[in-house]
Amino acid sequence: MALKLRLARGGTKKRPFYHIVVADARSPRDGRFIEKLGTFNPLLAKDAENRVVLNTERAKHWLDVGAQPTDRVLRFLDTAGIAKRDARNNPEKAKPGEKATQRAEDKAAKAAAVEEAKNAPKEAPVEEAPVVEEVAEAPAAEEAAAETTAE
């Protein structure tokens, strides 16, 4: 029989409270267990005395028998000095996905364009009066050309 040292959830909705138990690996999370070893209250401050209560003597016994702790319980055991937990590092997991990377690039490009527009030297305003006159002259020139061709 494969044994696990794991958490069994208790408490009400949105107010978690866990029991640290020894259970058969095939039994459900909150189902039947062999022995209760302690409690874990995640709502308390991390430095609170009652956040993790653990019967270290029984935990050592079950580890000697061959029970395998889950990662969270192994953290508690490491803090208590019962078992050693190796530090894990997976930098690939922290990297954003393709879509998030693309959105970040687009956002950076827009920010660069806005910054470039702010820093660009202001050009002298284009004189609009001559442009209006040219537009007014253009239809008159077309009419003159049309009259010449019609004759």
Image (cartoon, rainbow, N blue to C red):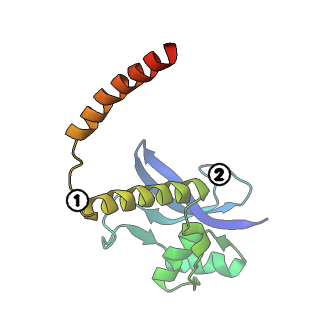
Residue at image coords 20%, 38%: 129
Residue at image coords 46%, 19%: 148
Whole-percent x, y for residue 75 in the image:
52, 75
Q: Quadrant of residue 46?
A: bottom left
**Which part of the image, by quadrant, shows the N terminus?**
bottom right
Does residue 4 lie above or below 137 as drawn?
below
Residue at image coords 25%, 33%: 133
Q: Residue furthest top?
A: 151
Which of these two is toward me, 82 or 16? 16
Q: Label 1 is placed on what type of residue? A: Lys
Q: Label 2 is placed on what type of residue? A: Arg
Does residue 74 lie above or below 38 as drawn?
below
Which element carries disc 2, helix, strand or loop?
loop
Which of these two is toward me, 138 or 3? 138
Q: According to the image, label 2 marks what residue?
A: 32
Q: Number of numbered discs present?
A: 2
The mark that comes first in sequence, 1 or 2, is 2
Whole-percent x, y for residue 127 in the image:
21, 45
Which of these two is toward me, 43 or 101? 101
Q: According to the image, label 1 marks what residue?
A: 122
Instruction: Give the class, few, some or many, for how many residues have Cα within 10 Å of label 1's Cα (few <14, many ≥20).
Output: few
